[in-house]
Image (cartoon, rainbow, N blue to C red):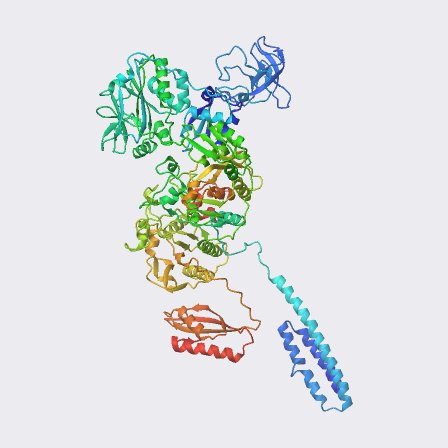
Amino acid sequence: MRVSLAWLAEWVDLPASPEELEERLTLGGIEIEDVLRSGPDLTPIRVGHVVERIQHPNADRLSVCRVDLGDGAEPVQIVCGAPNVAAGQRVAVATPGTVLPDGTKLKRSKIRGERSEGMICSARELGLGDDHDGILVLDPAATPGAPLDQVLRVGDRILDVEITPNRGDWASMLGIAREVRAHFPGPLRVPETRVTECGRPCADQISVAIAAPEACSRYVARVVRNVDPEAATPDWMKRHLEAAGLRSLGLVVDVTNFVLLEFGQPLHAFDLETLRGGCIRVRRAREGEKLVTLDGQARELSVEDLVIADSDRAIAIAGVMGGADTEVRSETRQVLIESAHFAAASVRTTARRLALHSEASYRFERGVDPTALERAADRAARLLAELGGGEVSPGRVEANGRPVERVEHVALVPERCNRMLGTQLSIAEMASLLERADFAVVESGEESIRCAVPSYRNDISIPVDLIEEVARLYGYDRLETTLPEGPVSRVVVPPARVLEEQVRDCLAACGLTELMHFPSASTEDLAHLRWPEDAVQRRPVRIANPLSQRDSELRTSLLPRLLRSAAYNRARQVDAVRVFELGAVFFAQGPGELPLEPLTLGIVLTRGELRGLWESAALPPLFFELKGIAERLIADLDMGLELQRTDALPYLHPGAGLELRWAGRLLGGVGELHPEAAKAFDLDVPCAVMELDLGPLIGNSPHPKPMLQVSPYPAVRRDIAVLLDRDQPAGVVLDAVRAVGGSNLSELEIFDRFEGSGIPAGKVSLAFRMIFQHAERTLTDKEVSKATDKVRVMLERRFGGELR
Amino acid sequence: MSQASDLAELEEQARAAIAGVVDVQGLQETRARFLGRSGSIKVVLRLLAELPEEQRRELGQAANATKERIEECVRARRAELESARIENALSDHRLDVTLPGWIAPRGHLHPISRVFRDMTSFFAGLGFSIEDGPQIETDWNNFGALNFPEDHPSRDTQDTFFVEGGHVLRTHTSPVQIRAMTGRTPPFRFIAPGRVYRRDSDPTHSPAFHQIEGFMVDERVTFGDLKGVLYAFARHLMGPEVRLRFRAHFFPFTEPSAEMDFSWGDGWLEWGGCGMIHPNVLRNCGIDPDRYQGFAFGMGVDRTAMLRFGIPNLQLLFEGDVRPLEQL
């Protein structure tokens, strides 16, 4: 809502400084989003003090002045043509470089041979009127150097304010004026609403019936006859409407809008002569009933919608918008003014269903004072009489529905108020704060301060509402800042978060970069990952109102977004993409149940040159880089996760895949991306991926193992190289060596793998390094040889190995 | 005294040989040739047995003295050779030390992860435990229990994503309050960091973003305590000079409610919302609002991350481009 300070000043006395007003309103809960100005911008113009005036040596009508600009420097010389300039004056000075309100940029100049370092301005030059007979002479108390806008209050200042949904009562000049008074006590000047009536009584011209009493608590109608269709909206009213952001649409409509802005009570004006049957009925719409609204749109209504009808048809959507058939036209003379109270929920339902939001619906949704209908109707009638020459028919026609439920009294417990705010306010202080906001204190004591709630405060119903009011008016900034007392219990971190952070650290230590994406993944992308149609991955949880189709399906896998990002980066010359994401994926559960959100890890690697390396270094295939990361993670987690060969995970290359198992359950996969998937994601290079469901692992982290004693006795190294069938999985051989190596075999690794020249076709040479060590003594040669012999024999017998 | 002249000759030969070796290996061999188990000096000593007692003693002493002199000579030559070797190493081994060093690339935690860690560790110091909740929530946890009336404009402020089946993507971390408080007896203090969703996307809004929620309930915790905790937090994040401003505001789930701004340059930046937990919320969680009271606050985390790391636009956090993230 936009609030003109010039208009506001008609209602209440404002503090001298608009900044102070804005600060108090802001702290009190009226958020000022923007400050707009009308009128010229005088901030660049400075106050100057004419120290000396002498006659220009070469021109009779010019003066040469020396002007002090309050900046501590020497007074500047300015040539001035005005007859009224004199020494000692405070004047408005534009210095070189200043842009005047008419857009001229001022320059240094020489006038008839005399330097002029600026201009002493007239009112017209400042955009303040047509007076060009001489310069503008300011208040002699004005401080030299001050910006002119601080000395001359001209133009209007318009605050664009945001009103919280609980304070519908603020959506009017009256409401803002009341709030100003709560901070800066003073009189409230409410516009005149008395009317002079004449002619046929209103009741003879119209009847009103409420058929939906639950949605309309009260309806007030006023009739104004013989409004002059030629009468124009006066400038002052137009200015106020414009300041509020409304267009002028003719006197009658302008008056209803103006009164809405004044009191916050939505009004509607009907052309009385277009109403059929001389009656107003407030009823539910019939299913499918049609109405063309003021904006020219044909609307189809439902039984949920409340309408205003005459004897034949709907003529307005209650509290939302009037109908075109009965609207006030340029020739309208007989006017029916509606001032009614409609239930917030009903207006809201209709406004939302029709996506039709108006000044009226905005206010009804937030709550309108149900006791102030007459005032607004009378005010509008008065203005139509005053400005349009209309004759106000005697009396109002009123009908009542179910009264609005209101809490009339609320009690504040002073001790509780102080306990909640951390204050030591006295009962009198609290009562006085409440009274500033128009709460009438009906009873006040140690036990309670009982207040009457103003009729427009539909947000006040329980004691804490009053505590807030006290805090707000006292000022949050004045509440003492303290730290909580009391015992501090053990700080608990959920096991899922412990696990998540452990995984995050491990992967960062492996050199991966963490990404975060909007958690969507299309079923199409999951098809690209070759998940079969009936896989749970292709039955995502859907967003009913997505921002875009792309983001309508919540992810069941982290891989699609990671792969898209990998492609995005590669398209931008980042060749080695090494990324991971940790987060929830979503799987639908039964109807009504919340989806499952298992914590999941996704990794994508693409191979690029090893950056920053200027000597060639051989790297194993990309698969092993990722496998190394998986093994590091498995070791760090220490929960017994296992890697097993697989060709069954759809997104993995069948010849380069491992599955991750834990306690017999399949939790994920590690391997090269299936080439078809790589193609679908626009990845032209080998890409290794891993996905792991961490959900089942949560809470299973082992206690940290105690550190092992390092043996002080020497370790003995023995290497064995063996020729094996090329198809023989090395991991199986390694496990077998470990199994027969005996308890003294403390380390085992493959340190060389070779095929090709010198090795028979179909064979591969594997070299094992074995480290033997005992915790309590030095091993003998004999012991070590015995163990290695066993390994040799096993390799020959079990694997047909040929020792080299 | 032929043996004695033999010894002299032996010593002479040894000195010459030692002087002639060019490396430590050769020195070892030469030493062995003269002083080893079957070296020349042993041969001389073996002859001693055949000599008369007196001569044997005399010659033995001479032989040992010779041996000791040769050893000394070996030691000296060894030292020479060592320093020559180091000299060679110094002159032969010249690296172009201006070539770049090499290290395996390091990893990068996401700025949001880093900020969350910092925040949770700060609050751990104040005794706040962490509580988590799901990102898809029931309407009750996200709205109803938090005192949003059915069909009220306050729900419009939340730009909610609805999930098929009637649930919502949580619009704030506040539902974690409901989860944490239900079934618990005060006193307690929790924070809830996490991802939330609003149906809003422009250069300054992402439809998925991050918040941290904090709440504390006991019998006496005050609005002043709320201010104190937020001041401490703000100073931790933004330095000791930061100022806070509390503006009255409306949230259905707190009362009194405030929005807080922090000072930034000459102005204020909006930080988040806070207030005393609304009695209806406490009641909805089975906590007696006549006995207990508490505060709650929540703020966006993404902008904190942007300010801390000098990230110029929000999209950089979530679009998957590694180039900005790997600078951090």
Q: Quadrant of the N terminus of chain B?
A: bottom right
Task: Answer whether residue A330 is visible to the viewer in this image.
Answer: no
Residue A119 position within the rendered picture, expressed as x and y whole percent measured from the top left: 56, 17
- Residue at horizontal 43%, vertical 70%? A734
Q: Nearer the viewer, residue B76 or A803?
A: A803
Q: Residue furthest top?
A: A60
Residue A483 picture location, percent across and down: 55, 43
Q: Vertical placement of A556 versus A289: above or below?
A: below
Residue occupying image coordinates x 43% and y 64%:
A640
The residue sitting at 50% across, 12% down in the picture is A131
- A322 over A600 or under it: above or below: above
The residue depicted at 26 percent of the width and 16 percent of the height is: A204
Does residue B298 appear left or right of residue A215 in this picture? right
Left or right position of A485 against A263: right
Q: Where is residue A651, by image quadrant?
A: bottom left
Q: How many marks?
A: 0
Q: Is residue A660 left or right of residue A751?
A: left
On screen, residue A272 above or below A592: above
Q: Is residue A491 visible?
A: yes
